[in-house]
Amino acid sequence: MIRYLLRRVVTMALTLLVISALVFFIIKLPPGDFLTNQIAELRSQGEAASVAKAQFLMQQYGLDRPVWEQYLRWIGLWPNPEGAFNGLIQGNWGWSFEYDRPVREVVGDALWLTLLVNLAVVIFVHLVSIPIAIYSATRQYSLGDYVATFIGYIGLATPSFLLALIMLFYANRWFGISIGGLYDSVYAGQPWTWDKVKSLMGHLIVPTLVIGLGGTAAMIRRMRANLLDELAKQYVVTARAKGLPQTRALLKYPFRMSLNPFIADIGNLLPHLISGSVLVSLVLSLPTVGPILLAALKSQDQFLAGFILMFVAMLTVVGMLVSDLLLAWLDPRIRFGGSSR
């Protein structure tokens, strides 16, 4: 197991290195960058002092150097003008030219708030969808099954951002309250206190419902289909014929085996939720990294956009490792199959 983990860590590092190169060079594909565009605008306005500052930043971060050198300096494998290695590997996330602040300060709380929102969504999706899927599969073609199927189709067909707009409108119209953001406006920019945490927990309900509805509906349909397929297999029929209690015959193997596809999807789950919730974050004014990434890409703020994309890539490779370990624990066929090689 230790040898396997070490091999996976090396593979993850190489994967992130390749992704970092793709991210950086794709961001650099459009002509110009934030500072080049800003210098042209400032020159047209005759602001010599601001132009000098922008040119200094270009030299400081090597934006006047070849693209390959910019990339190596960004990840920390090429020395800066002072002769020091100071990039992503060394913990320097770069400088946001649009905000004129370090990237670490720009993303700030947005990173862990993004993880908190998506963790709440993941928990909500599994807590709601798994019991409904089990009920639908064990009571196929019953009234409850038809109701769950109908709700699932509604959830799949309803865009999340549209649901967010509807909830914003009726919450204000019926109750006169604003459900946007992740805490009350009075706590914006304030240090974290117990009152701010309670406000966060209260505001977390709406984005969890809005973002999680589509995933819940999809998981109900997939889980129901997988479980029906497992329940029709010979080993389940044999177990029932030998008098194994129905609940144990359901949970012992069929339920566990039907979970395999969802465990395998863990690596894609968090990145998918982050990318898929950008519109919802904009509608609900959520202080997550989605809107920041969108603004950074539009303004060609390359270091800010590059770091957020690398953050999502890191979630992906770590999620893949977690899913592989969970699959080996959940399914003996995978565990024993891997140990025989």
Image (cartoon, grey):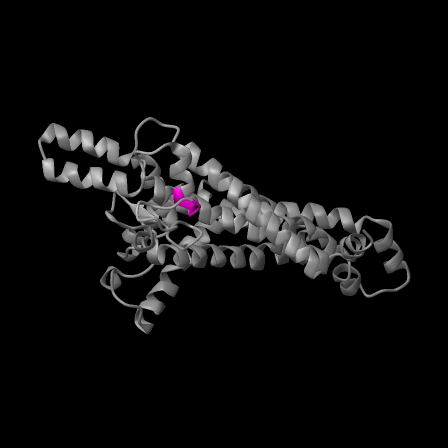
Q: Residue at x 54, y 54 (%)?
A: 125
Q: Residue furthest left?
A: 46
* Residue 75 drawn in magenta: yes
* Residue 81 drawn in magenta: no
Question: Would residue 225 be seen by someone viewing this image from the given angle?
Answer: yes
Q: Main secondary structure of the magenta part?
A: helix
Residue 338 pos. (x, y %): 77, 53
Q: Residue at x 88, y 64 (%)?
A: 243
Name the image quarter holding the N terminus. Answer: bottom right
261, above or below 250, in the image: above
14, above or below 174, in the image: above
Left or right: 65 in relation to 138:
left
Residue 167 pos. (x, y %): 36, 49
Nearer-the-camera pick, 188 or 138: 188
Left or right: 121 in relation to 293:
right
Residue 334 pos. (x, y %): 76, 53
51, above or below 200, in the image: above
Residue 8 pos. (x, y %): 64, 52
Q: Which contiguous range is marked in magenta?
A: 73-77
Q: Residue furthest right?
A: 242
